[in-house]
Amino acid sequence: MTDTAVEQDTKNVVEVGIGPLTIEQVVDVARGGAAIRLSEESLAEVRASRSFIDRLADDTIPHYGISTGFGALATKHIPPEQRRQLQRSLIRSHAAGSGPEVEREVVRATMLLRISTLATGRTGIREETLTAYVAMLNAGITPVVHEYGSLGCSGDLAPLAHCALALMGEGPVRDAAGNVKDAGEALAEAGIDPVELQEKEGLALINGTDGMLGMLCMAIVDLRLLLTTVDISAAMSVEGLLGTDDVFAADLHALRPHTGQELSAANLRIVLADSEIRESHRDPAACTRVQDAYSLRCAPQVAGAARDTLAHAELIASRELAAAVDNPVVTIDGRVESNGNFHGAPVAYVLDFLAIVIADVASMSERRTDRFLDPARNAGLHAFLADDPGVDSGYMIAQYTQAAIVSELKRLASPASVDSIPSSAMQEDHVSMGWSAGRKLRRALDGLTRVLAIEMLTAARGIALRAPLTSSPGTAAVVRALPGPGPDRFLAPDIEAAVQLVGSGDAVRHAEGVVGRLA
């Protein structure tokens, strides 16, 4: 992870109210440093629901999370004089994460989404606790959260507990400059008083799917970009390998009306338009190849299916963003009811689905790269695209690197959500593992970025070796941004330059600057 601080964007302010945030707003706060503010409607709801909690706190009948213990200890009644200690103990004991520090953007997204649920007025949080949490996020104070600790069932308990611990003025945090310091010190510097939690507040701060949902929101944004990039890299490979664009015709894809497939095929047609390389072998008398290999011909079918899976993930994310996840929850008519809405299965499944499609899209990309390097299949190019085969090895080992990543992506595609492990003395006997699904998805996105970068690098060299024939304007714009052919040189920097081109979105921007907006 990086310790680079998130710069506070004071111009872009996201309002958090009783309604849902958008995926884009989550990313603006998590990555862009946007500030947040609470709506007046939200604050009114928070005050109203807290009044119900205060009344139940005085009741002689035990109420879960208000006057009882938690989890397997839910039957133990806690006397009023010990309830603040109960809340402190809950947070301290649940802040039990271990392992590497989680990325700052993930923690900020987690905090924002917990604030969003608290702001619905369905959790019974006090107004002063909520506003202190908002102030902590706006001050750029980011609790140190660890890789391991969440089973993704009764909320992302450990990650959220580390955040709540900082709100209490305890534990390590990173300040706005990225420096590690004690939470109490960081809060004092920001003029924020540590919060002393009261009845129900500890549960309200940790009972949510916020960590896994935050990772899903950012993954959706990242994968949108990468799937457009997939179409560009596939177009470059089709062109450089003297493939045909006839199979991308709109009427052919209308015969199988999957939305993603049609969008992907349209991108391929647009990017490949006006290619001199393509025109050079359009005459059937000059080209005896009947059909291209699947990795070329079926590119929109695979990338399109990935797009449709992403659309499903966006639907699930939108529903979860509209949810108020807590247990117990304060209903609109003032009841305080236990429920199972904290279970992360809906989010965990789509996190796993996306890792699966990433592995498959990357696998097809690697197959296109491999075709470029084999003189038996690359339509007249040098072996390994080497400048002087034998003396030079060309991109031989770049494909090894790509293959190693694809192999890793296949392992990451193994779903976390099928691996429930019982906990809390069998009270929590089925868990979602959604946090784990989110963690591996982030690694998968990085892997896909690198695989596409190597395909683009390889295809760009193949296209360059077709000179004096010129490529399409769309692919030419990307080729110009990548290292050109020549004798062997230190290859790792070229690969990292291509990774930066893909990951930053510049590859898409270069193509769109010539051909217009792509889907």
Image: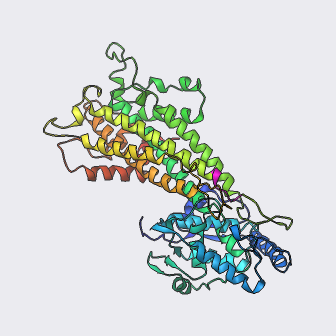
The picture places residue 269, in percent across and down from the top left corner, at 47, 31
| Residue at the front extreme, as displayed | 425
In the picture provided, is 515 more to the left or to the right than 385?
right
In the picture provided, is 291 more to the left or to the right than 255?
left
101 in relation to 222, above or below: below
The picture places residue 209, in percent across and down from the top left corner, at 63, 60
Q: Image quarter for residue 110?
A: bottom right
Q: Verify whether residue 343 appears in magenta.
A: yes
Q: Image quarter for residue 111?
A: bottom right
497 in relation to 459, above or below: below
Question: In the depicted view, which residue is nearer to us: 462 or 197?
Answer: 197
The picture places residue 38, in percent across and down from the top left corner, at 69, 71
Question: In the depicted view, which residue is nearer to us: 192 or 145?
Answer: 145
Q: Image quarter for residue 4?
A: bottom left
Chain part drawn in magenta? 341-346
Prevailing secondary structure class for the magenta stretch in the rendered image = loop
Looking at the image, which residue is at 36% across and 14% down? 284
